[in-house]
Image (tube, helix red, strand yellow):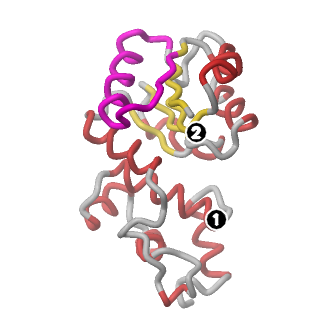
């Protein structure tokens, strides 16, 4: 298994590789400047355990990079790391199949927290089953549902839970995956229809 960093900007790519080496000691990291070389690299270096993808590559347009990776590797964690403001494109990236959107201007601490959360199994200390949901959701996911129902933003949720905004995004991604939905609106609709909010 290998970690794949796909970014055509040398300094950003090197910075990501350094961060990943500190975060996931001993794991193989593969650097690519184009998406077109991915499958050949996988044949040489092994199956992916994580993708770190820049949106703007010489051989991608818009969300095409996300869509291509998702079509070939539907279950591998995919972090989009882009220079575009999250407000402009984050929701579209998540709907296209990215697991988390990280701005390149974020600090190394925030990026580390988001990537670590992506690679952490859901069954950690903050993800114990909540009896109120009959084991369907973790305690953290149940908390998120209530906060989404209250209309809280990711920043407000992060402040209340004492975690980073990027970690909130990862928790939301896991919740979306668990419920088979792609947005906050769909999540709340599902939760109400299935009695997960006690309504």
> Please, is residue 199 above or below residue 8 in the view?
below
The single residue placed furthest to the front in the displayed view is 26
> Please, is residue 97 above or below residue 135 in the view?
above
Magenta residue check for 24: yes
Secondary-structure class at tag 1: helix
Residue on which the image places disc 2: 93
Q: Is residue 24 visible?
A: yes
Give yes or no for contact between labels 2 and 1 (Cβ–Cβ under 8 Å): no
| The N terminus, quarter of image | top right
Indicate the quadrant where residue 66 lies: top right
Secondary-structure class at tag 2: helix
Residue at 70% across, 16% down: 40
User: Residue 34 has which mark?
Assistant: none
> Please, is residue 151 above or below residue 86 in the view?
below
Residue 183, position as x, y percentages in the image: 59, 57
Indicate the quadrant where residue 39 lies: top right
Question: Is 185 situated left or right of 111 in this image?
Answer: right
Residue 96, position as x, y percentages in the image: 66, 41
Question: Is 23 situated left or right of 95 in this image?
Answer: left
Residue at 41% across, 9% down: 10
Residue at 56% across, 43% down: 77
| The C terminus, quarter of image | bottom right
Indicate the quadrant where residue 37 lies: top right
Residue 188, position as x, y percentages in the image: 58, 71
Residue at 40% across, 65% down: 124
User: Residue 186 has which mark?
Assistant: 1
Local crowd size for mark 1, using a 10 Å CA cut-off: few (<14), some (14–19), many (≥20): some
> Mark 2 or mark 1, which has the lower sequence index?
2
Magenta residue check for 74: no
Stretch of the chain drawn in magenta: 8-31
């Amino acid at each position: 298994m290998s970690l794949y960093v796909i970014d055509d900007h040398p300094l950003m790519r090197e910075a990501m590789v350094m961060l990943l080496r500190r975060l996931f000691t001993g794991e193989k990291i593969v650097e690519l400047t184009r998406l077109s070389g991915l499958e050949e690299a996988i044949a040489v270096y092994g199956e992916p355990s994580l993708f770190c993808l820049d949106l703007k590559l010489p051989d991608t347009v818009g969300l095409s990079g996300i869509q291509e990776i998702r079509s070939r590797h539907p279950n591998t964690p995919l972090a989009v790391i882009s220079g575009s403001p999250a407000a402009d494109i984050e929701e579209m990236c998540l709907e296209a199949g990215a697991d988390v959107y990280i701005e390149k201007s974020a600090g190394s601490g925030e990026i580390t927290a988001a990537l670590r959360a992506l690679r952490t199994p859901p069954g950690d200390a903050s993800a114990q089953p909540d009896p109120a949901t009959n084991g369907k959701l973790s305690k953290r996911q149940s908390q998120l549902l209530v906060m989404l129902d209250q209309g809280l933003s990711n920043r407000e949720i992060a402040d209340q839970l004492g975690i980073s905004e990027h970690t909130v995004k990862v928790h939301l991604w896991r919740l979306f995956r668990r419920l088979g939905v792609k947005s906050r609106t769909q999540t709340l609709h599902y939760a109400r229809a299935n009695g997960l909010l006690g309504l």
